[in-house]
Image (cartoon, grey):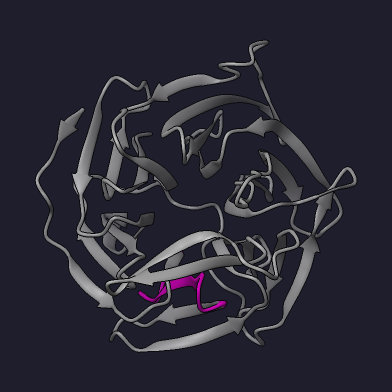
Amino acid sequence: MIRAPQPAFAELATDLRFPEGPVALSDGSILVCEIAGSAITRVHPDGRKSVVARTTGNPNGLAVGPDGALYACNNGGAAFRELDGILQPWGASDRFDGGWIERIDPVTGEVRILYRACDGHRLSAPNDIVFDAHGGFWFTDLGQARPRVRERGGVYYARADGSHIQASIFPVETPNGIGLSPDGRWLYVAETVTARLWAYEVLEPGVVRLRDSRWARGELLAAPGGLIGFDSLAVQADGAICVATLVDGGILRVSADGGRVEHIPLPDMYVTNICFGGPDLRTAFVTLSSTGRLVAVPWDAAGLPQHFADLAQ
């Protein structure tokens, strides 16, 4: 693994309550989920913050759908602890009873729950989300940790109108970040605890090719080792996958063939997510969650445009 120097960055917002799920909008503003604040917050180009919606539970991953609405993975309720000014997630909250997928009207702030269960099994802790060209979305369910029990995670596919959900890969060990290759042929999944990045060939919406192996059901792209965890991810236009990393905080950039792995450090042990925006999509917007910051990093490659990026007015 190549270790890059820490890049220059600009702080766009501070005092956010464990931000995640950044979404760059065409007007230059950035949406984030404040997980510990149970809110979707808009960071304006001048640094001003405004609340788009308040939710129950804890919104985690966020994306714009084909109807211009926001779709959020809600983990259902996480506990946090603060130690020496650093905010850290600490398993399930006392109120936890499963998570859900919710649709948020960006104009009115109305929050509507779309999915709580799949095939009769309640969702545990939905985490990250990506829409495909067909208007459906893939999402990860991390699973939730209790003192002596961990619920199993999985990868799901659903329609934005609330009419269909299916389990596409189950079980998966703490799946977190999820993304698609530029041509839509590969689905990428980052596992938090194992710090492994997998690629699955997409056969049709909601269906991937699975190997008949309990150890490697997809193609292993990266597993750097050491004290590091994987969080959410974004994909560059050239196909490289950029995974936010925990403990050894930063962005792990993996080439599409897995042949090059580079770690770009940032000053937070909970670097949780990245998205691309700005002119030519050459600015990385990164959430430094334990210190409550959203930062902008000049990037040396263009990000992959999202299929749906503009909000309903």
Classify the position of the C terminus by image quarter.
bottom right
- Residue 187 is situated, as x and y percent measured from the top left of the image, at 55, 33
Residue 248 placement: quadrant: top left
Rendered position, 221 above or below 308: above
Residue 173 placement: quadrant: top right
Which residue is pictured at 44% across the width and 51% down the height? 305
Range shown magenta:
21-38
- Residue 279 is situated, as x and y percent measured from the top left of the image, at 27, 62
Which residue is pictured at 72% across the width and 60% down the height? 100
Outermost residue to the right: 120
User: In this rendering, does residue 306 appear at all?
Assistant: yes
- Residue 235 is situated, as x and y percent measured from the top left of the image, at 40, 42
* 23 in magenta: yes
User: In this rendering, does residue 141 appear at all?
Assistant: no
Which residue is pictured at 43% across the width and 76% down the height? 17
Outermost residue to the front: 148
Relative side of 138 to 192, left or right? right
- Residue 190 is situated, as x and y percent measured from the top left of the image, at 48, 37
Rendered position, 2 above or below 30: above
Q: 88 or 6: nearer the eye?
A: 88
Which residue is pictured at 48% across the width and 35% down the height? 181
Q: 74 or 302: nearer the eye?
A: 74
Classify the position of the N terminus by image quarter.
top left
Rendered position, 132 above or below 31: above
Q: 93 or 153: nearer the eye?
A: 93
* 136 in magenta: no
Rendered position, 167 above or below 215: below
